[in-house]
Every structure is written in C-alpha cells, then in structure tokens.
Image (spheres, grey):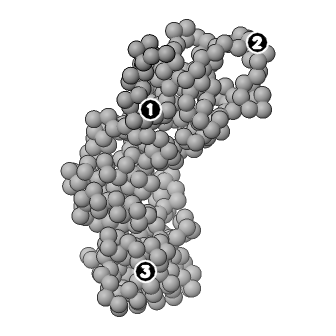
C-alpha cells in the first residue's frame, strides 16, 4: 500500500506527536478574569496570584507574563520547582510559599528569594541559623491557626502555643514581614467568626512583640473571601480559583480550560452485550458505541462511571461501563453521521451545548481546582490565543 492511497497518511507521518487528549487553555480569559478580580479589591489591598500546581495546570510560564502585564507584584507557590519557574519566566516581585516547608526546601529556595511561612520553633531556629551564617532571608510570615484549618498554623489559644510564639518572635522577629492564616470555611457566619478570631490573635502578637502593624502584612484573604458578602480584614487576597474562572461566572468570570479528546473506534453491538470491565453495563437494545481516547490516566477517574456524559457533535452522550486507563466508551446511537476522529468534549462547549463547572463537579465528585490541576499536568496543553 502506497502513501498516496491513504489521504491522511502524509499528515500523520509529518506530525511529531498526535495527542490523544488535550487541554485547551485560554490566556486572554485568564487576563480578563484577573482584571475583574482586581476590580473587586478593597482600597489598599494587594492581589496575590496563586500559581501552585503549575498555575492550576495552566502553565506557570504562560500565566506569569499575564500577571506581570497587569502589575501584580505577589505570587504564591508551594514547591521549589514552581519558584524556579516563576523566576525563570521573568517575575521579579514577591514570591510567597503558601504552605510551610521542610528545612531542605527552605534552604533550596533561598536563591529564588522565597518568603516562607513559619509556625514551629524548629523552622524558626533553622531560619535564624541561616541568617547567622550570612544567608539573605527574603522575609517570613508567621502562620497562625486561629482555631481554623489545624493544618500548618500555630495555635495560640493555648499556653503552649503562646510560649512557642514568643520564642519564634524572639528568634526571627526582625525577619517577619507578614502574619497569615487560612480560613477553613467561607459561609457568612463562619467567615465572620474566623476573621474575628484571626484579628484577635494578630492583636495578641502585636501586643507581645516589637512588631509594628505598619510594617507587617496581615492576610487571610482568598478567592472566596474576595467575592463574599462579608469583607475580611486582610492586606492581601491570595487568589487562585477566581483567576481560572472557577467562581462567580455570573460576574463575568470565564473558565480558562477545556478538556478534549477524539473518537477512535465505532462499532455496533446487539442487545444483551456487556460493556467494559466486570460487565458493569448490559445493553438493553442494539446500540452503536464509540471509544474515546481518554481515561483515568488522563484525569477521568473511575468515579465517572454512572451518570456522566461527553459532548460529540454538540450532543451530550452517556459514558457506558467503567473507565479504562486510556479509554472511555460512549453511546453514539443517536449520532448517525459520527466518524472516527470526531472531537469529543469532556469539559467545555461544543456547538450550543456545554458541560460546565457544576455539571463536571457532580460527575467527578470533586472541585474544579482539583480537576484543572490534574488535567493540565496529565494532558498536552494547547494555548488558544
């Protein structure tokens, strides 16, 4: 068989890689979401763009130029590799780690001048020792629990916690540039109480140290608190979800990622046939089924088995059977003109139909931040300019 007898073979042979599934990322939507979010900031508050998980799966190298263009001077990361990527993209502002770190991470991130969170005496001793050895400390943020997440903040409601806080202040007080917390809930009542507790704890710190309020950034704001009816007392809003269009689409925020794949096979099966692993589905009539080249290795977990759909030809078609590693099976009986190679939209728009955030969160039994980070790290990213 010659190449000329296969019309698609020329294109196939000249492409380096044909990707079975991919994320389409929309930089201009990120830029517009950022403009909208910054417009919600109270007077005097700063915006910190959270870029953890490679900018929620969107790619740090592509998001950093957007935030720099709009004059954002703060970014949040979690890993040292993210800090390096942020600096490599040309960002010269403040890089803040939005969790506590190991001593090895802290030492390794010093060339990137990362501001760290401190909530234990051990970490304070490590930073104090580094400073005595001549290391340049970019600044640290005292992390308080404020009866909240109980994750990595110091709880000063106890005598032990207050004593530890005093020792930390004695050791690294001159390096403290911020006091931070992370609120566990953003319901109006809980947010009000968390904000009050955090401010009480902050007042205690100032009353028992030489720190001056005018020199310290006090912050616990997030995307959810930025759009809440209750305005928290915070100098910085640390925002990720709203930047990527996960929240408040009624205010104009748009999703910044779509997930797509292609049909790879179409076959007719008679009534009584079983579909997928464990014969989980029995066909109740003759059906035409198609394979789509995406599965749990691409971030479509096995919880999608059940009441889940994808878009093909602008129609929502059901996923049948349990999710395989690289394949899902869908019922395309009602799409008579379907063909191998047709696009399947797992998340996003096609024609007049849409699988949006609420639908996807129900199907996946998780939040969009989880999905974006997963999809963006598991699939090829294509940037739609």
Residue 68 location, x and y as percent? 23, 54
Question: Is residue 148 in view?
Answer: yes
Residue 233 location, x and y as percent? 36, 63
Residue that carries the numbered disc 2 in the rendered image: 271
**CB-based contact (under 8 Å), mark 2 and mark 1:** no
Instruction: Tell me: 279 left or right of 194.
Output: right
Per the model, the C-alpha gap separating discs 3 and 2 is: 71 Å
Q: Which of marks 3 and 2 is in front?
A: 2
Image position of 382 with respect to 350: above or below: below
**CB-based contact (under 8 Å), mark 1 and mark 3:** no
Residue that carries the numbered disc 3 in the rendered image: 204
Q: Which of marks 1 and 3 is nearer the N terminus?
A: 1
Secondary element at tag 1: loop
Q: Which label was assigned to residue 18?
A: 1
**CB-based contact (under 8 Å), mark 3 and mark 2:** no
Per the model, the C-alpha gap separating discs 1 and 3 is: 59 Å
Question: For the point 27% across and 35% down, which residue is it?
Answer: 385
Question: For the point 31% across and 48% down, which residue is it?
Answer: 62
């Amino acid at each position: 068989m010659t190449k000329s007898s296969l019309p698609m073979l020329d294109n196939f042979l000249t492409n380096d890689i044909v990707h079975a599934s991919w994320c389409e990322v929309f930089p201009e939507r990120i830029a517009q979401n950022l403009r909208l979010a910054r417009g919600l900031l109270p007077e005097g508050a700063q915006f910190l763009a959270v870029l953890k998980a490679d900018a929620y799966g969107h790619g740090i190298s592509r998001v950093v130029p957007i935030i720099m263009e709009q004059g954002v001077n703060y970014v949040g990361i979690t890993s040292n590799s993210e800090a390096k990527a942020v600096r490599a993209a040309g960002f010269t502002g403040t890089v803040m780690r939005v969790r506590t770190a190991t001593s090895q991470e802290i030492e390794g991130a010093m060339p990137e001048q990362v501001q760290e969170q401190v909530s234990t005496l051990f970490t304070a001793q490590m930073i104090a020792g580094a400073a005595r050895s001549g290391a340049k400390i970019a600044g640290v943020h005292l992390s308080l629990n404020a009866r909240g997440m109980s994750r990595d903040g110091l709880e000063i409601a106890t005598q032990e916690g207050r004593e530890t806080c005093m020792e930390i202040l004695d050791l690294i007080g001159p390096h403290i540039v911020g006091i931070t917390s992370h609120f566990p809930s953003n319901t109006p009542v809980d947010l009000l109480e968390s904000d009050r507790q955090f401010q009480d704890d902050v007042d205690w710190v100032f009353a028992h140290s030489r720190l001056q309020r005018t020199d310290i950034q006090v912050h616990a704001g997030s995307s959810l608190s930025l759009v809440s009816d209750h305005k928290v007392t915070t100098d910085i809003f640390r925002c990720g979800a709203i930047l990527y269009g996960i929240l408040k689409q009624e205010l104009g925020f748009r999703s910044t990622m779509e997930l797509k794949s292609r049909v790879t096979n179409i076959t007719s099966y008679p009534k009584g046939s079983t579909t997928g692993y464990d014969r989980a589905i029995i066909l109740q009539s003759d059906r035409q089924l198609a394979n789509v080249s995406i599965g749990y290795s691409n971030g479509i977990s096995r919880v999608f088995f059940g009441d889940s759909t994808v878009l093909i030809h602008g129609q929502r078609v059901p996923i049948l059977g349990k999710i395989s590693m690289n394949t899902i099976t869908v019922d395309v009986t009602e799409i008579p003109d379907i063909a191998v190679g047709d696009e399947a939209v797992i998340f996003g728009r096609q024609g007049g139909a849409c699988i949006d955030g609420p639908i996807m969160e129900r199907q996946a039994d998780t939040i969009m931040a989880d999905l974006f980070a997963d999809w963006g790290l598991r699939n090829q990213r294509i940037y739609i300019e």
